[in-house]
Amino acid sequence: MTIPARFTEPADTTVEAPPKAKRKAAVRREVGRSIPRLESHAKVDGSAEYIYHLRLPGMLQGKICRSTVPHGRIVRIDASAALAIEGVHAVITGEDIRTLIPDPYYGPAFHDQPILAIGKVRYVGEPVAVVLAADLHVAEEAADQVVVEYEPLEPVFDEVAATKPGAPIIHDSLRPAGMFPDLQYLKGRSGTNVALDARVLHGDVEKGFAEADQVFENVFRSRKVVHATFEPTVSLAELNGSNGLTIHTSSQSPSYVRAEVSRLLGWPENRVRVRTAFLGGSFGAKLYIKLEALVAACALLVRKPVRIGLTMEEEFYTITKHGATVRIKTGMAKDGRIVAREVETWWNGGAYADIGPRVSQKSGFTAAGPYDIENVSLINYAVYTNDPPAGALRGFGISQIVWAYECQNDIIARSLGIDPLEFRRRNILHDGRPHATGTIMTNAEIDEVLDRLSDRMHWDVLFDHGSGPVRRGRGLAIGFKACIAPTTSVAVVNVYGDGSCCVSCSTVDMGQGSDTAMAQIAAETLGISTETVRVIHPDTDVTPYDMATLGSRSTYHMGNAVRLAAEDARAQLLRIAAATLQTDIEELEYRDGAVISRSGARMTMRGLMLARFGMQAGTVIGMGTFTPPYTKPDPRTGQSPQITPYWMLAGAAAEIEVDTETGRIRVTKLVNVGDVGCAINPAIAKRQLNGAGTMQLGFTLFEEMRFNEGQVINASLADYKIPGMLDVPEDLSAELVEFPHEHGPFGAKGVGETGMFSVSPAIANALCDAIGVRIMELPLTPERVLRAIRESENRPLESE
Amino acid sequence: MKNFELVEPSTIDEAVALLDPEDTGVRAIAGGTALMLMMKTRLFQPTRLVSLRRLNGALRTVRTDENGGLRIGALTTLTELEHSPLVAKAVPVMSRALRTLSNVRIRNVATIGGHLAHGDPHMDLPPILLTLGARVRAVSSRGERWIDVADLFLGYYQTAIARDELIAEVDVPLQPVNVHTWYAKFTALSADDWPTVGTAVWYRLESGVIAEARVAVSAATERPMRVPSAEAALTGSSPTVQMFAKAADAAADEVHPLADIRGSAAYKREMVRVHVRRALEHASRARSTEAE
Ligand SMILES: Cc1cc2nc3c(=O)[nH]c(=O)nc-3n(C[C@H](O)[C@H](O)[C@H](O)COP(=O)(O)OP(=O)(O)OC[C@H]3O[C@@H](n4cnc5c(N)ncnc54)[C@H](O)[C@@H]3O)c2cc1C
């Protein structure tokens, strides 16, 4: 039996796009409805599956013994005291891993991270050994007893200092991973902490500055923060038959985990099975390899199932969001137009690159902002330091960049006496104009985003700044992101004998509502109701390849793959009916589990099955593959005619109250506007904007990892505070800008990160509007604000 | 975590008998909100936990005593206190403070006994209880004694409660007439964070003049403490904005704030100044206690 399948080759993957007007007019039953999430009940009654709760028969629990120094040579590991504790099954070190995996280094950009430290440690908290015991508490107690002796090396923590000559070198040499096409230009390097310097050159920036009437230059910084997902990172591995391995993991990238673990083991991919469930949040923390290689190696060494589940405290030593220093220099013409912009960014990637080079390069090339600027020069350094590794966090570096350019735009606007909104209008990059990378801007509704912000904020109405100790201010900011490319999603839609259907795809529902969105897309295409569709969770033995659930790419990429798969299944059903009814396919329509012809003939699902399989059972499998086109940028100039499948535009505006005696900021109103193409599920899309906005509010006002010599001194939710209900602005709202994207599924773009981009500068700009004080470093803690106020009044607070 | 023993006695006599003054690993556990944090960070590794959860009855009530004061059982949860009409009537300053004390989930399990015995300076109720002149009844197999809240906090996480003692109840005396009170909580991080500075004020007016004043500061300092210089500045003067500012300056000069992730010492000193003044201003606007 051959199953007709439709593979769309990457080269000709252009999804036919009816003109805008026609799309808008189409009557839809499922897409565009605010359907409650399919899993809501299961999440409330506790039956939703999370890997953190999984226990396997005969399983051992692993507890990681972590480095206590930021940089040092391992002189000796003595596990004898730990092994003497009753119930300890084994203590595994990097050397043990090597007996199984001779070259145990992993990473999506560079193969720089050892499964357990070998010879050297590069940050406080780096895994050095694992204690395995049936009882987690025994493992925990024994992990404390593993004695590790270090010969300390000089550490470096600051991202700028780490690039200076004479800085301690963290990795002797760097080996590019070569897995992702967008990172294939990475080069092997040695003797430097700079993993990558990515450039974009457009026009002649020196000439631009020379011709400018005025030049502004500022340095903006953001500190390291963490994802703080409520389900900590967890992985379990078990042997699967005589030569296979199953990994259960809270991962956003099951397909990648399969490939990378197979590569490490030197196995074909079909011997590694990776499955996930719902994730209790992720935000980029659970991408690529986290604990998977470690549990896999442990399980193979001891021939028993092994689970490692981190505590919330350990999360602070696993993956973080990049701190960044951004130097931005802007040349202005008298008429308020930006004529030249140069941005130099140092990204603090910590001890291992993880996906830092992609963060640096992808966010870096947008560093001039969504503005039409003739002369642009952008340089991004992905820098190693002795901090915990940094990777993706909801926006892949965009918010650190927007923080710089949108604060500086306000500085310039104020200095030139131009209204900040008007300043942006004068400079925005309109559709049809080239971005600094050379890619032409399309399907990007920047004007509309600004209009909505203006409306929502009543920007034209005079604003009361208050009097007395509490002053009021308002501010706005816009930002944008280019969706990652090139990536592929594959989906299968399986229609069963009774007409019910399952969607198989490797998109991970980590709280963003992707199950519901995929079900809506399949349901719309098949003319059935969303609630009847079941989405099968990622299991690499069952669900087809997907690059990963990241970067707001799933709705667009997987959404298209699911749509294509459903169309394929529908086409097969119509073909069966056409053959049986002896009619043209064009005469037929598939709806509510039956094929209906224009002449009134009707074939039920049972009839279709009978016709196809000779009995009233069977299955019709539709497949869809989606890879949008992409052209690699020139490594010298960063130029590419097609750098991204779509741009995500965002704007935020805030009204705040600032207590000038304490420095505390209260955000009273926050508006988040996102250009979403078309909202597959408007309520979920709005919640993404509000959720991201609230998350960024914490990063703006108080979240910050605090370090002492590489040690995180607030590594727990008791001391690292995230916003609670009382921190949410009284007036919090999200607004969707919907102009269908010509290639999006039903016009949709991604929305998971959009709400993060502009919140921080909007609030800092509001602060400046309120009291004339400009702060260039995040977060805007009360103390930082009060110190700035006191500076400006010439009565500074004592430093200690 | 090592294995440990968990015991759940059903009377307070049994409970104190299970405490062991010689073993630092033996402790009572009430709501467990503070103790579990210490166990997670391994600051405390128990050998035996004496759970107080079965001592509910008399130790979990709020009542008015024969002198009109409040008696609060040590196992009363912070939520129960927050919603107690007796507390709201007698000491509204406490009900108000409870509403912004951490969050509902913590308040639902945390107890007043654990709150006071923990000795953490970053707590909201101790400075208030200091100004209200409260005391606690401590019980051990040796007998019982009353300890003024003023004498309870000896230092950073140090209290006058001996290792073999339990707090059984808290006594908040009937407040005199014409008393004005307020508690100002300032958080530097999230709204539901521990206070960066907590200031409680209390003064009694006689013919428009402050006859008696109590000012207490917590969180910024190593223990919740009264601030005599501020109290002296207030006593004998009329409650004016200028006087309040003077008292606030005195308080800021007197305290020795500790720097931590919530703020530098200099910043916390400023916050003491601002919040003592604001608490006094609020107190002067708040309704005073009246005669029964
Ligand atoms: C996340 C978080 C946020 C918080 N925020 C705030 C805040 O904003 N403001 C605030 O004021 N507090 C805050 N707290 C602290 C909270 O109020 C205390 O944790 C709580 O009051 C302690 O009560 P408990 O019953 O849980 O004590 P437990 O944790 O059970 O015990 C604490 C200590 O007291 C001892 N103990 C308990 N009961 C007795 C007794 N009857 N006699 C003698 N010793 C006893 C225990 O042995 C232990 O040493 C917060 C706590 C958490 C976890």
Image: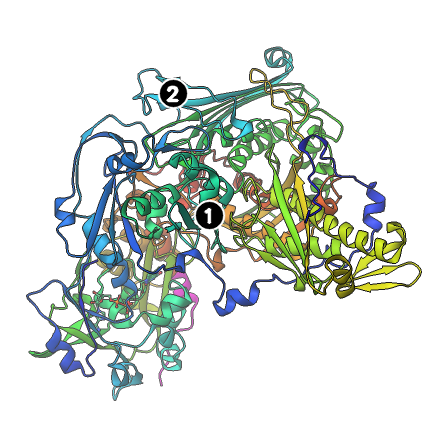
Looking at numbered disc 1 in the image, what kind of residue is underneath it?
Val
Q: Position of residue A63 (x, y in %)?
A: 27, 49
Q: Residue at x 85, y 64 (%)?
A: A602
Up/down of A281 relative to B146, above or below: above
Identify the residue under disc 2: A163
Circle 2 SS class: helix
Residue A521 visible in the shown view: yes
Residue B90 as seen in the image, left or right of residue A497: left
- Tell me the residue at 31%/27% (across/down): A156
Height in image: A111 above or below B99?
Answer: above
| Residue B67 inside the magenta-drawn segment | no
Q: Where A529 falls versus A370 (above or below)?
A: below
User: For the view shown, which residue lies furthest in the bottom direction?
Assistant: B66
Q: Give the label on residue A141, or none.
A: none
Within the image, what quadrant is residue B157 found in? bottom left
Q: In the rendered structure, which segment of residues is drawn in magenta?
A: B280-292
Q: Residue at 41% of width from left, 22% of height from top?
A: A194
Q: Nearer the viewer, residue A218 or B27?
A: B27
- Give residue A274's mark: 1
Q: Is mark 2 within 8 Å of ligand 1?
A: no
Give the SS element for disc 1: strand
How are the residues colored? rainbow
Q: Amino acid at mark 2?
A: Thr
Which quadrant of the frame does ligand 1 lie within? bottom left
- Give x and y (percent) for residue A666: 50, 51
Q: Could you tell me if residue A285 is visible in this image?
A: no
Q: How many marks?
A: 2
**Where does the image place residue A214, in percent across and percent down from the top left?**
61, 18
Is disc 1 surrounded by few (<14), some (14 to 19) or many (20+) residues within 10 Å? many
Residue A423 horizontal/vertical position (percent): 67, 31
